[in-house]
Image: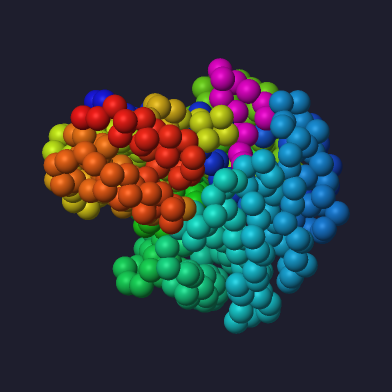
């Protein structure tokens, strides 16, 4: 079967960002001193549709949550929205200093593993608010490389030296925690950073080279974001008009492992800066939801908003409760899974002849749950010991494409029962190696000549009886998996018929 190269598949999928529902959509939103309510605005902001587009995240970290009751009201609003799947749940609420973080997620797509307070907020010189980490895993996966740690941060506002020092302290604590995550763990930092420039020390700390906890801007858009029209498509504050849309305070930063084109990965090309001429950048799934670039230094455009239309835009303004932020989201491709045949069974093979048997290997990612574009390409190679042989690869398989078939061959020099293992090495984190049993029952051209002395006589009968009695698999002539009376009858018939 022809298999497209991985580079070709990656190029195709990267050029076509997934729609909501393809892959795992992660969002962050400073929800503006939320005490509850704003139900209609939540419904429209999250599940309203315009030209087929909807925010519709699968996991959302939020800031400025004021109580456990408010978090439950947000969850209820998400579940009651028209078009909602109604499967939203909330992580435990942690009441820290000042306003708090929250995390809501769809239980049919995300498993919450843990909620961890990374650093507690407090009075100066401390940072003001807690940093919380939510460890999650996409439904259907079990391994460490499929696990994602989502950090929520709301850093100190302001541009004074003390403000920047407190932001730096928070960044150092986040970075130290990310550096200490288990090997293979992916991670994302979302929140209201209140950082005006990528040159500020807090941002430098988060993105500096060294150790494994380094964060990366998936849209590769460094600079001085504050009050610069060059960044009008990625500004998030303030849609309600208090100062206008002129800051990129709200961001999602990702681990480098999410941009290596393998396993769980950002849908987009992190090497390419976000477009400066359109919000609809085909190289990225990252969006400042609602910002079509027409609102620089103004309140968010409603009439004529080309990204979300007037109703969603107005709902986003309403959510600001006077002054606030736009949500930001990105899409992740979930890892490949591997499906392979349970056994490669040659059956009975004549000694000295070339025989072949097929093994099927497929990308077993759940297309119904994640969509074909939301699942990573399966990369794999094959290996089997002599006297069996198989083309090694490497090979690739897209989700939903069906199984690739590979021929395993055997040239057996002498009679006997052969059993070994075909090893499939994959990039599927839950199954990095898959062992498939391979077996063949090699018989002489004259099976009745059981002792292979070139003569058909009672000694062959006794030789077969000696193998049949201790259940030698070589004596399983009907290949039933059991050595029984039916095998004995088959040999007896062959012995009586002669060669």
Question: In front here: 141 or 407?
Answer: 407
Question: In front here: 328 or 114?
Answer: 114
Residue 405 included in the magenta stretch of the image: no
Residue 49 included in the magenta stretch of the image: yes
Residue for point 50% across, 57% down: 143
Q: Which residues are magenta?
A: 47-58
Q: Is residue 455 left or right of residue 332?
A: left
Residue 179 position within the rendered picture, expressed as x and y whole percent measured from the top left: 44, 72
Q: Is residue 230 left or right of residue 449?
A: right
**Picture quadrant of residue 403:** top left
Residue 364 position within the rendered picture, expressed as x and y whole percent measured from the top left: 46, 37
Task: Please identify the quadrant where the N terminus is shown.
Answer: top left
- Residue 340 visible, this angle: no
Residue for point 48% across, 70% down: 181
Residue for point 73% across, 42% down: 88
Residue 160 position within the rendered picture, expressed as x and y whole percent measured from the top left: 52, 70
From this view, report whether residue 454 is shown above or below residue 22.
below
**Picture quadrant of residue 466:** bottom left
From this view, report whether residue 80 is shown above or below residue 246.
above
- Residue 133 visible, this angle: yes
Question: In front here: 311 or 206?
Answer: 206
Task: Please identify the quadrant where the C terminus is shown.
Answer: top left
């Amino acid at each position: 079967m022809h298999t497209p190269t991985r580079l070709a598949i990656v190029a195709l999928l990267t050029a076509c960002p997934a729609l909501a529902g393809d892959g795992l959509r992660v969002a962050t939103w400073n929800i503006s001193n939320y005490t509850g309510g704003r139900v209609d605005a939540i419904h429209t902001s999250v599940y309203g549709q315009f030209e087929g587009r909807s925010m519709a995240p699968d996991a959302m970290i939020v800031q400025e949550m004021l109580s456990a009751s408010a978090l439950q009201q947000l969850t209820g609003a998400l579940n009651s929205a028209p078009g909602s799947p109604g499967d939203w749940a909330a992580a435990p609420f942690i009441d820290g200093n000042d306003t708090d973080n929250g995390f809501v997620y769809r239980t049919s797509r995300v498993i919450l593993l843990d909620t961890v307070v990374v650093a507690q907020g407090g009075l100066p010189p401390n940072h003001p608010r807690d940093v919380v980490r939510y460890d999650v895993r996409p439904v259907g996966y079990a391994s460490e490389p499929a696990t994602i740690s989502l950090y929520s941060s709301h850093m100190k506002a302001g541009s004074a030296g003390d403000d920047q020092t407190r932001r730096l302290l928070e960044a150092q604590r986040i970075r130290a925690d990310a550096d200490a995550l288990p090997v293979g763990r992916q991670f994302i930092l979302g929140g209201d950073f209140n950082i005006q420039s990528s040159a500020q020390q807090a941002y430098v700390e988060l993105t500096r080279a060294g150790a494994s906890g380094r964060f990366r801007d998936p849209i590769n858009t460094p600079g001085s974001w504050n009050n610069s029209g060059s960044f009008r498509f990625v500004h998030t504050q303030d849609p309600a008009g208090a100062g206008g849309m002129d800051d990129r305070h709200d961001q999602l930063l990702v681990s480098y492992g999410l941009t290596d084109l393998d396993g769980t990965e950002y849908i987009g090309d992190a090497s390419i800066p976000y477009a400066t001429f359109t919000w609809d950048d085909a190289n990225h799934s990252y969006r400042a939801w609602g910002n079509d670039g027409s609102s620089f230094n103004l309140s968010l455009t409603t009439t004529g908003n080309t990204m979300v239309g007037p109703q969603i835009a107005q709902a986003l303004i309403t959510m600001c409760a006077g002054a606030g932020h736009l949500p930001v989201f990105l899409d992740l491709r979930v890892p490949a899974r591997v499906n392979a045949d349970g056994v490669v069974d040659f059956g009975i093979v004549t000694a000295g002849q070339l025989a072949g048997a097929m093994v099927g290997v497929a990308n077993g990612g759940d297309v119904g749950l994640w969509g074909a574009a939301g699942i990573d390409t399966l990369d794999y190679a094959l290996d089997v010991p002599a006297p069996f042989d198989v083309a090694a690869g490497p090979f690739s398989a897209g989700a939903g494409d069906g199984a690739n078939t590979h021929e395993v061959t055997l040239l057996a020099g002498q009679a006997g029962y052969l059993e070994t293992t075909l090893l499939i090495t994959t990039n599927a984190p839950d199954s990095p190696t898959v062992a498939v049993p391979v077996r063949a029952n090699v018989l002489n051209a004259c099976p009745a000549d059981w002792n292979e002395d070139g003569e058909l006589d009672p000694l062959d009968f006794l030789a077969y009886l000696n193998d049949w009695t201790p259940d030698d698999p070589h004596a399983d002539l009907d290949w039933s998996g059991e050595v029984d009376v039916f095998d004995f009858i088959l040999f007896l018939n062959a012995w009586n018929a002669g060669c």
